[in-house]
Amino acid sequence: MRAWTMLAAPMILAACTGSYEPRPLTDKQASELDKALAGKVPGEKMSCINREPSTNLQVISNNVVLYRVSRKLVYKNELIGSCSGLASGDTLILRSYTSQMCRGDFATTANLMTGMQTGACALGDFIPYRAPAK
């Protein structure tokens, strides 16, 4: 029994390691993302952005969200982990205790009708997409 445990332990540990690979976007989600970012140019990744009172959240998938600050500025965020339920209409609840949203800030998703938590993830880097100056 002890020998079996010694042989199984490395395999169990190996199964727990690895990297997270998000699901690819569906054709509909990719089209929605392309439409939202059309005519905008990506900038350098940022680890934090200021909380804007007028920021609108647009969910693309369980892994990709857009923060629309204005018609000229949109931040794309690829979540770390998958916030299950986002794509089906659940609400994203951020746990941030500063005036900024930053990479690594913890988030959960919840179904507001049932009050049940449906997923958990963290914010990734923010990629600004700006309309080019005319």
Image: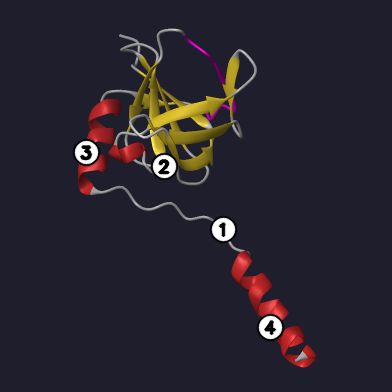
Look at label 1 and name its amino acid: Ser
| Mark toward the start of the polypeptide (4 vs 2) | 4
Q: Is residue 126 left or right of residue 31?
A: right
| Mark toward the start of the polypeptide (2 vs 1) | 1
Q: CA distance from mark 4 to mark 2?
A: 33 Å
The quadrant holding residue 104 is top right
| Mark toward the start of the polypeptide (2 vs 3) | 3
Residue to which mark 2 is pinned: 63
Q: Which residues are magenta?
A: 44-52
| Mark toward the start of the polypeptide (3 vs 1) | 1
Q: Is residue 1 left or right of residue 99?
A: right
Image position, residue 50 (x, y; %)? 55, 14
Residue to which mark 4 is pinned: 8
Residue at image x 59%, y 17%? 100
Element class at badge 3: helix
Q: CA distance from mark 4 to mark 1?
A: 21 Å
Q: CA distance from mark 2 to mark 3?
A: 15 Å
Depth check, mark 4 against mark 1: the one in front is 4
The quadrant holding residue 87 is top left
| Mark toward the start of the polypeptide (4 vs 3) | 4
Total marks placed: 4
Look at label 4 and name its amino acid: Ala
Residue 31, which numbered label?
3
Q: Nearer the viewer, residue 129 or 26?
A: 26
Residue to which mark 1 is pinned: 19
* 82 is higher (above) or lower (below) than 35: below
Residue 69, which numbered label?
none
